[in-house]
Amino acid sequence: MQLLYQSHSPYARKVLVFAHEAGLADRIEVIHQETSPVERNPGVFALNPLGKVPVLVCDDGTVLFESAVICEYLDSQHEGRRLFPSAPAARFRAQLHQALALGLADAGIAVRWESKRRPEALRWPPLLEGQLQKVIAACDYLEDRMVDDQAVDVGDIAVATALSWIEFRQIHDFQYGRPRLSAWYQAFCARPSMRATPLSGDTIDRPQSVRERVPHAVAVD
């Protein structure tokens, strides 16, 4: 299998951590791909019309994208304990935490756009604050609900990798004032799967002109 990956993507890291936890990491060739909302990567677009990583190319040539889909596929490819629980209560808890982690990462990325990446004259402080409040509320929710007395599942992996990106990009100091979440996070970060997949690097944004994007575009005065 081949995994199109980006070393500073929380979604891609989630998949790779999942692969390690499932014992599949040695079956996956990781191929780094730079992607950005303003920089088209033709190789990624050829496999995923959304132009984003992670993308998994399976051994039979099947192409999967979006982290939740890839993780569920990987869970069908090993003989160990399933990371998508089968018992309804545990499964829905794991899926809920996976959904929360997705929203947490999305909101964190929106915060970074409004505080760092968008040209300063185009930033909108109310949007930044609104997205930051989602990050804070999600972390408060997790403080009340995370427990460490159970087997690791996809929800735990999703939460840990989303929080690691929030920490990596200094979006919000989620450990301050949240002792239970902090203890859980630090313990999870000590796992071999997390230690083997550190976040690194920065997004490369090189906005292209219309003429560069569309070969036969006609200039309009």
Image (cartoon, grey):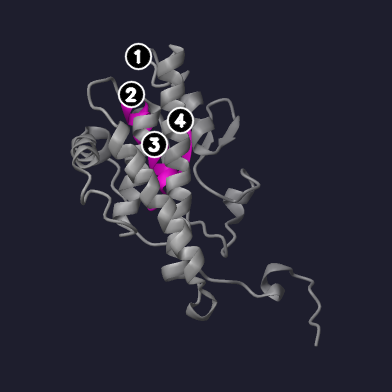
Quick check: 64 above or below 38? above
Q: Earlier in the sequence, mark 3 or mark 2?
A: 2
Tell me the amino acid under the disc marked 4: Leu
Assess whether residue 196 is covered by the magenta stretch.
no
Quick check: 75 above or below 191? above
Eye-nearest disc, 1 or 4: 4
Tell me the amino acid under the disc marked 3: Ala
Tell me the amino acid under the disc marked 2: Gly
Residue, disc 1? 80
Eye-nearest disc, 3 or 2: 3
Residue contact between numbered discs 2 and 1, judged by CB atoms under 8 Å: yes
Q: Earlier in the sequence, mark 4 or mark 2?
A: 2
Q: Which residues are magenta?
A: 1-24
**What element does badge 1 sit on?**
loop
Instruction: Kindly indicate the quadrant of the structure image that contains residue 214.
Output: bottom right
Residue contact between numbered discs 1 and 4, judged by CB atoms under 8 Å: no
Eye-nearest disc, 3 or 4: 4
Please tell me how crowded label 3 is: few (under 14), some (14-19), or many (20+) other residues with Cα within 10 Å: many
Eye-nearest disc, 1 or 3: 3
Question: Residue at the location (32% across, 27% down)?
Answer: 21
Please tell me how crowded label 1 is: few (under 14), some (14-19), or many (20+) other residues with Cα within 10 Å: few
Q: Earlier in the sequence, mark 2 or mark 1?
A: 2
Eye-nearest disc, 4 or 2: 4
Mark identifier at residue 158: 3
